[in-house]
Image (cartoon, rainbow, N blue to C red):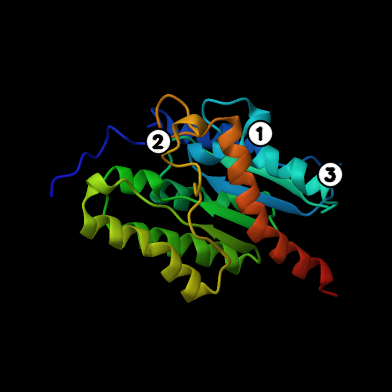
Amino acid sequence: MRRTRTSHALSLPAVLILVWSIAVDAALPSASDTRPRIVAFGDSLTAGLGVQAGESYPAQLQRRLDDLKYPYRVINAGVSGDTTAGGLRRVPWILKNEPELVILELGANDGLRGLSVDQTKSNLRQIVTQLKEAGAAVVLAGMKLPPNYGEDYTTRFEAIYPALAQEYHLPLIPFFLEGVGGASSLNQADGIHPTKEGYEIVAEQVLKVLKAVLSERLQEP
């Protein structure tokens, strides 16, 4: 089945390399903030395309962690248009933040462009390996695709995330946009990117998985 590879992509970047350096320089933590760092590593769904900076899911997650007295700083390292290949190239910049934990949300653009499922899985595997080797814990965010991409492709694509979570013993967010994807009232006009209210739901879903991970880490000697 022929698949459209560009019309649904999440904000294709014209100058992605330049955006990387700008995003990472902005994300690098100040010396005065000594809290352990959670890096939200992803594409436009993490960056918060189309909403105010304070309405993105990392910003809303930060406020919820503050409310719950978790002493962590959330750094938004989302780059609009990023693929898993782009994410793999960005890993050294991500590690400059010295993250204790990384929320990995990548792959949607690969799927929407109909890229190789095997290559997407390989890229994610390499990202996870490099992050873990650097000492960062990883929470993996699962993705799904619209049905028009064909049953075989969507099934194989969506199976990437639980397979990697099992292989690397990672906490898994089964579907990053659960309860938001496909809901017109929670998405912007493009039907892809959540509104402020949509990101509020996303942040709560991330928090459900994150709380167990953080509570365990805070109990470690």
User: How far apart in space, not on screen, are marks 3 and 2 (Cα)?
Assistant: 32 Å
Q: Position of residue 34 (x, y in %)?
A: 84, 49
Tell me the amino acid under the disc marked 2: Leu
**Quarter location, residue 138:** bottom right
Mark 1: few/some/many CA within 10 Å (<14, 14-19, 20+): few
Query: Dividing the image into 4 quarters, which one contains the C terminus?
Result: bottom right
Tell me the amino acid under the disc marked 1: Ala
Which residue is painted at 82% across and 66% down in the image?
218
Q: Is residue 20 visible?
A: yes
Q: Which mark is residue 10?
A: 2
Q: Position of residue 82 (x, y in %)?
A: 43, 41
| Residue on which the image places disc 1 | 26
User: How far apart in space, not on screen, are marks 2 and 1 (Cα)?
Assistant: 21 Å
Mark 3: few/some/many CA within 10 Å (<14, 14-19, 20+): few
Q: Position of residue 35 (x, y in %)?
A: 82, 51
Q: Is residue 180 above or below residue 7?
A: below
* Nearer-N-terminus badge (3/1): 1
| Residue on which the image places disc 3 | 33
* Nearer-N-terminus badge (2/1): 2
Q: Is residue 101 visible?
A: no
Q: Which mark is residue 69?
A: none
Mark 2: few/some/many CA within 10 Å (<14, 14-19, 20+): many
Secondary structure of residue under mark 1: helix
Which residue is at the front of the view, 72 or 147?
147
Tell me the amino acid under the disc marked 3: Asp
